Image (spheres, rainbow, N blue to C red):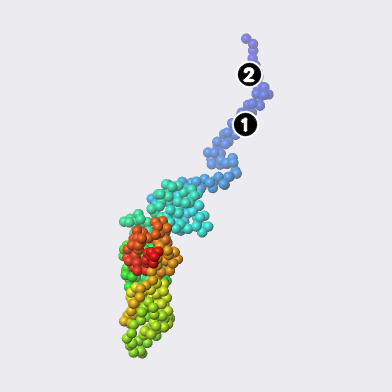
Amino acid sequence: MSHISSKQVYYFSKSERRGIALLLGVCAMLITYKILSISGYEQPFELSVNYASVEKAEEKAIENTVEKSVQKPFPFNPNTADEASLLALGIDKKTVRSIVNYRKKGGRFKRPEDLAKIYNLPKESFDRLKPFIQLDNQRPAYVKNTFHSERNSAEFSPVSFDPNTADSATMVQSGLKSFVAKNLINYRSRGAIFRKPEDLKKIYGMDEAQWEKIAGWVDIQEKESSKSEPLDSESRLEEKKFENKTKEYFTISINTANPDEWQKINGIGPGYAKRIVQFRENLGGFISVHQVAETYNLPDSVFQKILPFLSLDSAAKQIDINTATVDQLNLHPYISKKQAQLIVNYRQHHGDYVNVDALNKIQAFDEKWIEKIRPYLAVKSENE
């Protein structure tokens, strides 16, 4: 056995020494990193931050939070609801932006169905939200006997109004549907005047439910009470004529009398005479002396005093519903533009009317209105 020296046992070559040094260096680095990590001095290796990615992540987190916080649908007006409310209804953010952009460009939702036209809104989402859409003063049908019903009732704040002077907004605020308020104003603009609350039942579209809702808020004011109104000044002047002139017993034909003849009656001046004749011409003639009372702004006190001097001895003019145009029908104070259009449309689709009673086939027409307008309508034969 050969003798091996200690130098030979513990001797490392040059390459081995390099490998041992490298290994020791790596171990030292790992030990140092571990110590720093435990002590809280660890520094991030990547110092640059992608803020766009962070923002997207935050938006995603917000959307997830909104989705989790979506509750049962509640009444909302798509014309005024803010983004937070729309998101809370379960509408996705892209669709909410489409709604807001549509409104910014002047778009308005006039009917619940208009919301379905918004791009990106799924049909199932619209079907879910439709019962809760509340446009202006409309109330959603589902709110009966619910918490939302109580809330809407609290927002409903009717006020007393005079149908002879009130604007559309006031009447709608008091419970009248907007299209009925428009019909009322059109009716009023043709010379009609409301003398008692029940006169509002003459308005097209005024059903029993509407009437019961507003009946307690109708407050018709006496025209003579205000000294600042020119018409009231005229009324006071005519009242003096009653006092200063002796009574004359004569009558005039209300369908043929001209303005000068009307002024022969105590209480009728140039203004009243002109309006009475104009109203008569628009009607096509009176069928009753009491229709004179419907003349625009003619006080009931004046009408009651001139009533004994009025007589009816000629028939009113009639409109042939088989030949009249929409504009010709609409000239009549008792026929609105919509009613005129319905009369013509029915004739165009079903042929000429056999008689005036055929108007009853138009479901939109009320029987009372047909009876009222009947004397002014006719179905004339070719031989007449």
Q: Which residue is mark 2?
A: 9
Residue at the (58%, 36%) spot, across then down: 32
Quarter occupied by residue 152 = bottom left
Q: Which residue is mark 1?
A: 25
Residue sitting farthest toward the top: 1
Quarter occupied by residue 368 = bottom left
Q: Mark 2 falls on what kind of element? A: helix
- Label 1 or label 2, whichever lies nearer to me, is 1
Q: x%, y% of residue 226? A: 39, 80
Vertical relation: 238 (above or below) 183: below
Q: Between residues 5 and 25, which one lies in front from this camera angle?
A: 25
- The first of marks 1 and 2 along the sequence is 2
Question: Is residue 33 among what the camera can see?
Answer: yes
Q: Image quadrant for the C terminus? A: bottom left
Question: Is residue 206 among what the camera can see?
Answer: no
Q: Between residues 146 and 167, which one lies in front from this camera angle?
A: 167
Q: Image quadrant for the N terminus? A: top right
Vertical relation: 70 (above or below) 12: below
Q: x%, y% of residue 317? A: 38, 71
Dot 2 amino acid type? Val
Q: Between residues 138 and 39, which one lies in front from this camera angle?
A: 138
Residue sitting farthest toward the front: 383
